Image: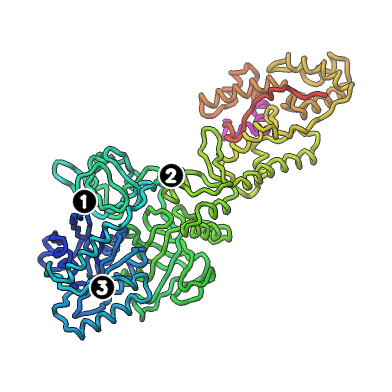
Amino acid sequence: MIVGTAGHIDHGKTTLVRTLTGVDTDRLKEEKARGISIELGYAYTPLSNGDVLGYIDVPGHEKLIHTMAAGASGIDLALLVIAADDGVMPQTREHLAIVQRLGVPRAAVALTKADRADAARLAAVEQEVAALLADTVYAEAPRFALDGTDAEHPGVVALRAYLHDTAMQLPARHEAGLFRLAVDRVFTLAGHGTVVTGTVFNGRVQVGDTMRLAPVGLPVRIRSIHAQQRASEVGVAGQRCALNLAGIDKDAIRRGDWIMDAALLPPTPVTRLDVALEVASTVSPDADIRLAHWTPVHVHLGATHRTANVVLLDRETLAPGRSDQRDSRDGTALAQLVFTAPVCAQAGDRLILRNAQATQTIGGGTVLGNIAPERHRRTPARLEWLRAIEAMLAGAGLAPLLMQAPYGIAHARLVRLTGLPPEVWDVPADALSFGHAGHEQCLILAPNLLALRRKILDTMAAFHTRLPDEPGLNAGSLRRLAFAGTTVPDALWSALLEALLADGELERHGGWLRLPTHEIVLTAAERTLADRLLPRVLAGGFDPPWVRDHATALNVPESDVRTLLRKLARQGAIHQVVRDLFYADATIDTLAAQVATLVHAHTRVEAVHFRDAVGLGRKRAIQILEFFDRAGYTRRVGNGRMLRPDSEWSNPKEGTRIR
């Protein structure tokens, strides 16, 4: 368990920690000279069950709230220190508000300097504290009147016993998440190199593991670990850990950075977070607290301190006590924080807001989206997505999220959002992991996957109805028609297409996709003429005869030859490259393979490369390349061609369909 102090300056926080542990947490010369805490202090004491109880002592000065917030993140119990002679003071209220908004689950109250107060004064302070805590989650927190300088004082003995008992009864934090440590101190140690300390928010780490320094993304190797001030092979969630890092210099790390599992690192630096905000006037009752669009704020998240601007998503202004449009709560809203520098977070992380001058705590919030869009952030669909994350954080599992994701959610995105690996996700029974070989899997509800398949098949059927004599659609055109105005992830599209082809619900003929039921029927006379024409087209190879040449050789009217060849092209048996010039399907396959070979060799294929490879003239080479452009196999980029990522060219195993 980690205990964090809280309270007004000069109320005896550091003295009490020293009395409880025997450790003076003021380690700086300036702290000792001035008699006040300036930096975070740390102390540890052994428990009777072999565990270690850790303390984080925070400064109480109003100008050091940013340091206090860094120390309070991740603690298990807030030790609220209130001097009996002063009673509740401004930083008492502000520190209490901070630990509450950071989600610290439990608290205890130490009434220090009780030896200086008579019974009447102690009773008055007790009432003051009761009123302070009445509307908080700490209303039932135990209170101990004591002399913080006397280790044998009954109040100190009772407080020590309470903290030790609570620590030994506290269940271990869940270690299923991926590792994250919030760096609150960095230094070098002679003979060891760079060391960072901080609270482990999630997961576990072992000596020898390679992690990432975030947000910059640099790799770091864990050379050794001290957990709760003891040498250890592992560090786990809920512990204070010192990590000796290999491969990085001290100057590359600062307070507010994170050491985390590589799977949690976003693909690009994050400067926007979607959050659920709450503002309250309880910290400074006389203050006029109001948030509007682009209000500047200071944000404390983990050990990070950043400046940001607020973008309210579901209202225009936010003030304490106003009726919320989303539900019955007061002073809450969905918002986006736009930061001036990259940040790291995952859904469920708690944060503190202070005003632009950093003189007043105005509220707090919970991170919902850790990769937030810059555009369309206030759309109904986006707001429903954020409410689904709220439901997930409230214990509803992934079902609310998947209901808002018609195209599914990539596994990597879910890992970064939740901080959990796939094997521990709370997945609904009708969810499927679906993906294409070589691409990342996504999680999607079975009804949503079925709807996507149906959309593709309905689009194909509508095309056949509208243009019955056309052979079908290339993959790119089918994707654009089926999902116009939306963005289907490449991996999902490839997997859908592969599944429909494997299940026989779509067929591929050359570069065309079509339904298996789609047929272009030939008459008996046409079948007879086709039997004479097709061998001639195939025998022509890369330079087949023109329509007039077929007509002359077979003594058939040119118009009949042209009509039949176009019909065969719509069947997919042959391909019309230009007017009156048709290539066999097998020949086009060979030419397509040659294009792919040239693209892989030169990044893009130019007409001169293709001309030399196939031994044709420049004009014919360009005609064939333009045919591949129209078919959706290639796209022109400058003077060259590149393969379209969503297109393939292959022969159907059953051969061409001629009737």
Q: How is the model colour-coded?
A: rainbow
Q: Amino acid at mark 3?
A: Arg
Seen from this angle, which residue lies furthest bottom? 120
Left or right, 515 with respect to 36, comes to right
x, y (%) of residue 150? 11, 69
**Marked residue nearer the N-terminal end (2 or 3):** 3
Determine which residue is flagged by label 2.
Answer: 421
Q: Secondary structure at mark 1?
A: loop
Name the foreground residue: 546 vs 245.
245
Q: Amino acid at mark 1?
A: Gly
CA–CA distance between discs 2 and 1? 31 Å
Determine which residue is flagged by label 1.
Answer: 50
Left or right, 455 with respect to 144, comes to right
Q: Which mark is residue 143?
A: 3
Q: Secondary structure at mark 2?
A: loop
- Determine whether 58 is above or below 238 in the image: below
Residue stretch rendered in magenta on the structure: 622-640
**Marked residue nearer the N-terminal end (1 or 3):** 1
Please tell me how crowded label 3 is: few (under 14), some (14-19), or many (20+) other residues with Cα within 10 Å. Answer: many
